[in-house]
Amino acid sequence: MTTNDIIDLEQQYVLGTYTRAPFVLDHGQGCWVYDTDGNAYLDCVAGIAVNALGYGDPALIAALTQQANTLWHVSNLYHTAPHARLARQLCETSFANRVFFCNSGAEANEGAFKFARKWAMDQYGPEKHAIVAFTGAFHGRTFGALAATPREKYQAPFRPLLPGVRIAPFNDLAGTAGIMGDDVCAVVVEPVQGEGGVHPANPDFLHGLRDLCARHNALLIFDEVQCGLGRTGTLWAYQGYGVTPDLLTTAKPLAGGLPMGAVLMTARVADVMHPGDHGSTFAGSPLVASVAEAVLARVAEPAFLADVTAQGAYLKKRLEELDTPHITDVRGRGLMMGLDLDVPAADVVNAGYRHGLLLVAAGPNTLRLVPPLVISAAEIDLLIERLSAIFQEL
């Protein structure tokens, strides 16, 4: 099939909920992907912060192949070893005492909301059910997660949404305190907002949220679906802030591109959940969990995280050195960078295709860079060279 044949086939049979690039990707290696016409692209999207180890990683291929030869899926009616080992890894590398597995970031956030409400119901009764989220947040597109994602274009066609969600101003502790109350069961926040424009939370803000939750007997949920698992230079973003949540949601990079999410939680939350309270057919399957074990083992290595920190600092330095009036701000943590522009980000993304770059926006005028965590200094230099050429054209 030709490139046009594939695109025509998709447009005929796949629901049109995405605006895709005008080519067909065929294979990848390291930080590079290649289309069906043989064009190479330096990938600074990584499947939207998913492919932490890039493409063709030998350890991931070995884990997948080995498990594929034994057992793929049996459901959570039965014990299997990979998800139990993975849960131990997640707990031993974080604050958590228990893990619930699911299949995506939205599912993880839905689960966290349910667990928080169940905890509040058991401890305080049905009146304590409100959830506080923040301006600029993105927690997913399912009904509960969407209610905590204050984007009019996402919410408007699907109202009414989950009731009981309040929106507070991000990085504004006083504003948040003004809508907190003893009826709040949980506060959910991204330590670094991703879809909202790559906005890191201020350390004082997260510390203040921890105090507010203690004052109102509410749980603190960190959504680390995009910013967790090494992306900011620490294994978990909360570790870089010194603020420990009660629940943490993770997904995107967890299984190296296979669908997996998880909710990490303390014992006091886990203790209110019982068989039948929540579930998932596919969650924690042996195949996906085996790959996730390999991802987590690699990303948790101190030397790996030190390299992410170093390359992130180098990327930020090189971005700040770009000689262009089109960049008005550079911000982020680790290998999660946002560039505010005085031109539409979509124009830069589209120009990137002509220059062999995969780029992604995070809002109308923000370019987001979330490359594989294995990107090299030489590849960062090439990215800067190609970005410079793009900005000269605009």
Image (cartoon, rainbow, N blue to C red):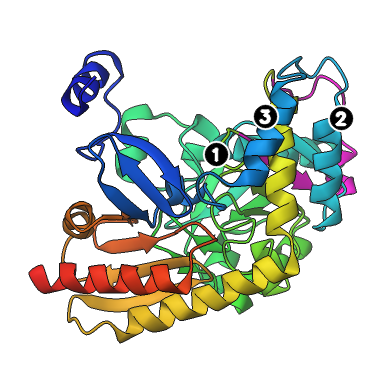
Amino acid carrying label 2: it is: Ala
Q: Tag 1: Cα neighbours inside 10 Å, few (<14), some, or many (≥20)?
A: many
| Residue at the extreme left of the image, as rendered | 393
Which picture quadrant has residue 252?
top right
- Magenta part of the protein: which range? 260-280
Q: Residues within 10 Å of mark 3 (few under 14, many from 20)?
A: some
Is residue 375 among the parts visible in the rendering?
Answer: yes
Q: Residue at x 22, y 25 (%)?
A: 7
Name which of mark 1 and mark 2 comes first in the sequence.
Answer: 2
Amino acid carrying mark 3 in the image = Thr
Of badges 3 and 1, nearer the viewer stands 3
198 over 43 or under it: above or below:
below
> Badge 3 is on which residue?
65
Relative image position of residue 364 (x, y in whole percent): 24, 57
Confirm whether the magenta stretch covers residue 309. Answer: no
Using the image, determine if residue 203 lies above or below residue 372. Answer: below
Read off the residue under disc 1.
257
- Say whether marks 1 and 2 touch (CB < 8 Å): no
Could you tell me residue 211's position as x and y percent? 73, 69
Where is residue 192? Give x, y as percent.
53, 63
Identify the residue under disc 2.
81
- Which amino acid, mark 1? Gly
Q: Quick one: label 3 or label 1, which is nearer the N terminus?
A: 3
Q: Quadrant of the C terminus?
A: bottom left
| Mark nearer the N terminus (2 vs 3) | 3
